[in-house]
Image (spheres, rainbow, N blue to C red):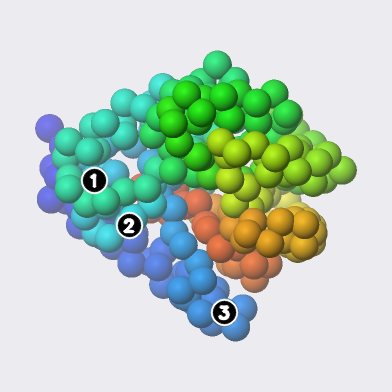
Amino acid sequence: MINLDARRFELHANLSQVRDRIARACVAAGRPSSTVSLIAITKFFPASDAAILAEAGVTDLGESRDQEASAKVAEVAGLTDATVRWHFVGRLQTNKARSVAGYADLVHSVDRPALVDALAAAAGQAGRQLPVLVQLSLDADPDRGGSASEQLLRLADQVAGRAELRLAGVMAIAPLDADPDPGFAQLAGVAEQLRAAHPAATILSAGMSGDLESAIAHGATHVRIGTALLGRRAPHFG
Ligand SMILES: *Cc1c(COP(=O)(O)O)cnc(C)c1O
């Protein structure tokens, strides 16, 4: 049996460390802490962990696979009254768009025209406007998603042209096993171009457990933190 009190203690300790890291990174970057939001990425961890974080004041939770996310969103709602916003941050197949549009408050991973069409149709069917980010690829690795910078602004225009979607900004994942600074510097440049064309697209989603300081130095408004909050995931999973 899981000892929930021990787990709660562990998660609270991890959360205060992560909040300290964010606060220090903001000081180093000369930015107010209020300009950076924490998204706890709860993939591969149980709904009970997500509920503990929500009750500890984490208002934003994220998932990367629809099947796991759709079940967990419902489960967490049954465990806590805390208000939670759900972020979908993983690679998204068009046939999952309808499901994701049913629970996501922000989709971070829009990286191709067919996905824009699928999400717009799904949001329309759900009778809502769905906020999305366009994902920039920093490593040209198709398994990690994202669009090349040459196509990204056109993709953003496509999103902005759909009444069922709201273009909220840009997201990226740093290359594996490399210094994150050059990639995040490139991302900051793209984010600036995006804001020039679409002034309301102010979100910059970047930074994970290993590189949040670099992301905040380069203007991240939302950091997506899994491991540093919840612990290590099984090695062969995302
Ligand atoms: C898993 C995941 C994260 C969290 O990564 P950690 O290194 O565990 O903090 C962030 N963003 C995306 C897109 C992810 O898939």
Q: Mark 1 points at which residue?
A: 51
Identify which amino acid the numbered label 2 is placed on: Val
CA separation in Å, label 1 and label 2: 9 Å
| Residue 98 image position (x, y, % from top left) | 48, 22
Q: Earlier in the sequence, mark 3 or mark 1?
A: 3
Q: How far apart are marks 2 and 3 (CA)?
A: 21 Å
Q: Report the residue marked by disc 3.
A: 31
| Type of amino acid at the residue the image marks with label 3 | Arg
The quarter of the displayed image where residue 149 is located? top right
Would you call the spot at circle 3 few (<14 residues within 10 Å), some (14-19), or many (20 or more)? some
Residue at 31 percent of width and 26 percent of height? 71
Disc on res. 58 = 2
Residue 95, image x, y percentages: 55, 16
At which x and y percent is residue 15?
34, 61
In this rendering, position of residue 95 left or right of residue 56? right
Q: How crowded is mark 1: few (under 14 residues within 10 Å), some or many (20 or more)?
A: many
Residue 221 showing in the rendered view: yes
Regarding residue 28, the answer to whether it shows in the image is no
Mark 3: secondary structure: loop
